[in-house]
Each structure stands twice: as C-alpha cells, then as structure tokens.
Amino acid sequence: MPVSPMLLRLSSAIALGLLASACGGASFEFSIGGVSVEDAAVTLIEDDISAQVGMALEADCPAVPDPDVGTEFSCTATTADGAVIEFAGLIDEEDHIDLSSTNVIRADRLDVWERSGAGAVSELIGGPVEIDCGPDAVVLDPASEMTCVGTDQFGEAAPIIYTITDLDAGDYDIRIGE
C-alpha cells in the first residue's frame, strides 16, 4: 500500500448500498414497567446492551425531569477500559423507551464495514485489500474514528482509518495511515 495518507469520501449512494440497516449503531427498546425512565435505561444498558455488544458497561443516565411521550434524553456507559459509549434516548410511547448508541459499532456488524472499506481502498490503490477491524465491538473515539488493519495482495499491512460521518447511514471517510 502507498505510504502517503489518502482520503476517500464515500457518497451516500455507495455507502448505503452495502451499509443500510447494517451499519453498526445499536437501537434497543425497553418497557419501563413502573420504574423511572433513567432506571429503565440503566437496566437496559447494563443488562441487554452490555450482553449484545460483548462488554461490561456501567451506565449513567441523568434524571429525566419531564418523562412524557416524545421526551428525548441521553445516557452514557463506561467500558472496563474507560471508553465512553453515548446513547440517545426517546420515550416513544407510554411506559416505553428507545435507546440508540451514537458511537459504537457492534462486533456482528464490523464485517460490513470491513467489506465496504476494502472495496473502496482496493479501488483507490488498484489492487485487492482485506481489512480487519478485530473481533470485538468498537467504541468510536471522540473524533468518531475507528482504526483497522488493511493488508494488500503482497502481504503489506497498513492502518486503515475510518472517520464515521453518519453512523446510522453508514457514511464515512477512509484513509490509509502511515
């Protein structure tokens, strides 16, 4: 792979063809069942979401002062290694919440990102590339970046850096690092 950094912007048309509805953010629904919105969200994050992303999570959800249908709220969860996952919440119906992660890509969806990125980088350098983002869910850093490893047909490896511009739509910039 070339050593000079390159940037490739994937348009929505390219990205959506492969990534639509399989991008990586996680959306979860939960029946409140008589507890506060924030307690329901903490339970959802620490039990269900933790199991689904394969990481122990410690949730923090500030009090929701006006828990009416249509109210939006946010939560965070901290992983064992200190990474922070952000959640957007919505009381979408009576006694029911919906939480969506805004900065985590589930392990079971990484292959979609790897294939899409490999196609883009292969086209960019004019030869086949395989990308490996690892086996675990990825918490995006504050710059919304995820670093994977790309290997070309000659066995040369280089960092492949995705900058996620819209997690839900699957839009990203990708560059070959040095």
Image: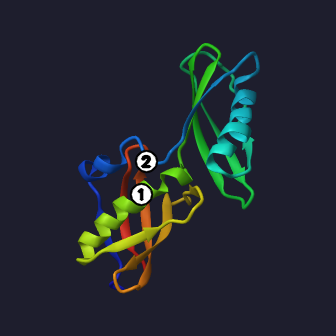
- Asked if 64 appears above or below 49 in the picture, the reply is above
Q: Answer few, some or many: residues within 10 Å of disc 1's Cα (few below 14, many 20 plus, some between 14 and 19).
A: many
Q: Find out whether the residues at labels 2 and 1 contact each other: C-beta distance under 8 Å.
A: yes
For mark 1, give the secondary structure.
helix
Q: Which amino acid does label 1 sit on?
A: Trp
Q: Which residue is drawn at 23% across and 77% down?
A: 126
> Nearest the camera: 166 or 157?
157
Where residue 111 sits: x, y (%)? 45, 57
Q: Is residue 178 visible?
A: no
Q: Would you say 33 lies left or right of 92 here?
A: right
Q: Residue at x 32, y 50 (%)?
A: 18
Q: Answer few, some or many: residues within 10 Å of disc 2's Cα (few below 14, many 20 plus, some between 14 and 19).
A: many
Residue 23 is labelled as 2
- Asked if 161 appears above or below 49 in the picture, the reply is below
Residue 113 is labelled as 1
- Asked if 156 appears above or below 53 in the picture, the reply is below
